[in-house]
Amino acid sequence: MVDVNDYNNEYENKWCPGCGNFGVIAAMKDALVKQAIAPHQILLISGIGQAAKLPHFMKCNMFQTLHGRALPIATGARMANHDLNIIVNSGDGDCYGEGGNHFLSAVRRNVDITLLVHNNKVYGLTKGQASPTSDMGMVTKIQRHGVISEPFAPLSVALSLGAGFVARGFAGDTEHLSYLIVEAMAHRGFSLIDILQPCVSFNKVNTYAWYKKRVYKLEETGYRPDDFEEALRLARQWGDRIPIGIVYREEKPTFEDKIPGLKEGPIISRRYDASKVKQLFT
Amino acid sequence: MSIDITVKIGGEAGQGIQTVGDLLALVCRKAGLYIMAINDYESRIRGGHSFFQIRIADRPVTAPHHKTDLLVALSRRTIDLHEKELAEGGLIMTDQAEDGEKENLVSIPINDLAVEAGGKITANTVAAGVCLSLLGAPFNLYREVLSEHFSKKSDKVIQDNIKAAELGYKAVEKRVFHRAFHWDFGQPKGMLMDGAKAVAYGALAADCRVAAFYPMSPATGIMAELIARSDVFPIVVEQAEDEIAAVNMIVGASFAGARAMTSTSGGGFCLMTEGLGLAAMSETPIVIVNAQRPGPATGLPTRSSQSDLLFVIRASQDEFPRFVFAPGTVAEAYESMLRAFDLSERYQVPAIVLTDHYMHTSVWLNDTELTVPDVVERHIADKPADDPDNYNRFAVSTSGISPRIIPCTGEALIVSTGNEHREDGHISEAIDDRIAMVDKRNAKMKAMTAEMAPPEALFGDAGTLLVGWGSAGGAIREAVELLRDEGYDAGALLFADIWPFPADAVENRLKQCKRFLMVEMNSTAQLGSLIREQTGLAHSGTILKYDGRPIYPVEISDGFKRIME
């Protein structure tokens, strides 16, 4: 039996009190325990940012890498061993800014990993600059006259690139987020959960209260996430009402399915054969 | 009589110059001859001017020759550009003659003959046939090569090509060429190999399982070779979205337990320097091939250089141990890959193999036997299984090497990060941790240095040594022969192992000579700078070439004489 305490470690947590990341980590532990996955059976990969620190605060296999680069690292890990169960923890700056090209490519490849983007719409680690998802007009110490770019729309972008599992979660609803993580991990192929996450230190607009007033659960509306056009409409819904839940789900052949060399199992499990090398020289 | 003949085939991109060259190389190999061939082309798919230059000899040849015995001109421009390179008694074979035949010009209606044989597409077979006929090669040899070369095509294709070959032979049957010789040199002496193939085969022999890359000349050929063999070998090759992704994919793959590599050229390597640092900090073994071309920025995409040496030994911020190899021959390129993979895993550091455009696109007949390991040792720890709770990925040790495990293969947990960290892999900003980890990583340098081979010495006791590295070695070798034939007291030191720098061995060698001269394909003698930094010994002169073209032995011997005067 796997217990939630199995995932606790003694490493000192470094997030601000009240940080939305606490909701995310609680939901992750809950989802892993529900699936009876033990710490040595999971690999967390992250980049840089407050979200990317998460793996350090959980007892499990982990590789915290470079800013924006978690997805290519995870893709490479799956190329080596596609039996690995991988969750990538990233933030809006890490994934949609620095790692934007990798995000587009990971969606297109349909690598079988679960990507959690802790989207707090602001740069936390570097103290409050606008992020790719900050709403237009948001004022920061750097964006003194307000953000002048359109916000990055992760759900719409993922959908338009053919993503097979697109969901939105809310860090303030751990139970719902845990459900989404279980569903995302069960999905064969790339799964994205963009997690709305308040930043208590630097985002004074998108607070817990702000979100609580607006979010509604798609599951409670009778919505079936198999209509692409409807999914696109919901992906763009923002303002007074913000949907959370599974926006779109469609299983397709994965990156790993499409590589002939992986049919016989993980590439690391295959045997070295010197006679094949010798044949190169005949 | 010794055979040493150069045939140069010039024309526009897309005309099939390379095919003519390939056929000549195959026939020469079959006849038991040695060859060395260079490919010269522009960054375009059609038009412009390119050439393939093949040197045919009855002994191993390591560099191109500056004189052409037979110039095959498939364009008028080829004659204008290369006529001056003709050796005494040399011939030009062309279908571009404007004012009838001159004494040294053989006019052949190549395209007409090709059409007669079955189609314009056989023009290259006609052209190669003309060359072989002029050089006295037996027709049967050529016929066999054509049958083998087109064995996967239809009978008609084979018959058309044999017909084209016959017509080419007949067209010059009455022409006497004084460089014709008797083609009888026994069995093939080895295998035709270009640098790209040598690197790829080395990677396969090293059991590389994952490769990721972003297309870039001249490195893409390696990946094409790997992909071509991915049905037979357990290897996955992925074209990444950019070089940043490519290097990080292989870090991820290696972390997950596969031997992994990427290949690129200087500009792509620039983008990879961040990932190189991650490999260093997380002590994840990776192999990067940097096939150099002239820079900065886009530079000369289809030309060669040796200008990234100081860059790669220092690339990425701060300090960390790494291996850098710069093989000088195709055999060394193959062996360097084996060593790069093995040493990278043994010491858990990145390894860089520096090649260049010249090595990747030139063809040699390799007669050196290549190592094929029976077993590939992976240097993975099995201990943590006994005590998984106390496993520390970055445990401090005197060697600097900590036990490496593969995630999700046992109970022990692996914690790794690009941040500075504690022994258990978690981030730390503590002073003690920082010092311990820097010292631990650097502690590897002593044993790593001992792995480095000293430079190869040719007449190492000579008064004046020509010192070079990587692919320039071939031309330096022949320059030493030329100089010694003329009575000069010349020798050479050729570096293939660059970093960690084998300083003691180099110092001992260089102290014995009166002077040493640097021969490099860059504008500042980068290896010369490194030697001075590492040994305190300064070179007395330089022979540098940085126009992107291959260096010829005679350019080195001339440079030597100029300096010595």
Image (cartoon, rainbow, N blue to C red):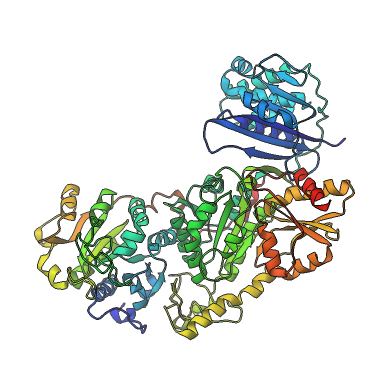
Q: Image quadrant of residue B189?
A: top right
Residue A184: image x %, image y %?
27, 62
Identify whether A9 is placed above or below B21.
Answer: below
Front in this rendered view, residue B514 or A85: B514
Residue B240: image x %, image y %?
44, 52
Q: Image quadrant of residue B21?
A: top right
Q: Is residue B468 left or right of residue B179?
A: left
Identify whether B42 is placed above or below B372.
Answer: above
> Which quadrant, please, contains the N terminus of chain A?
bottom left
Residue A82: image x %, image y %?
41, 60
Q: Is residue A172 left or right of residue B325?
A: left
> Which quadrant, please, contains the C terminus of chain A?
top right
Front in this rendered view, residue A71 or B368: A71
Residue at screen point 42% across, 78% down? B426
Residue at screen point 83% across, 25% down? B178
Farthest residue toward the front?
B565
Q: Is residue B20 left or right of residue B382?
A: right
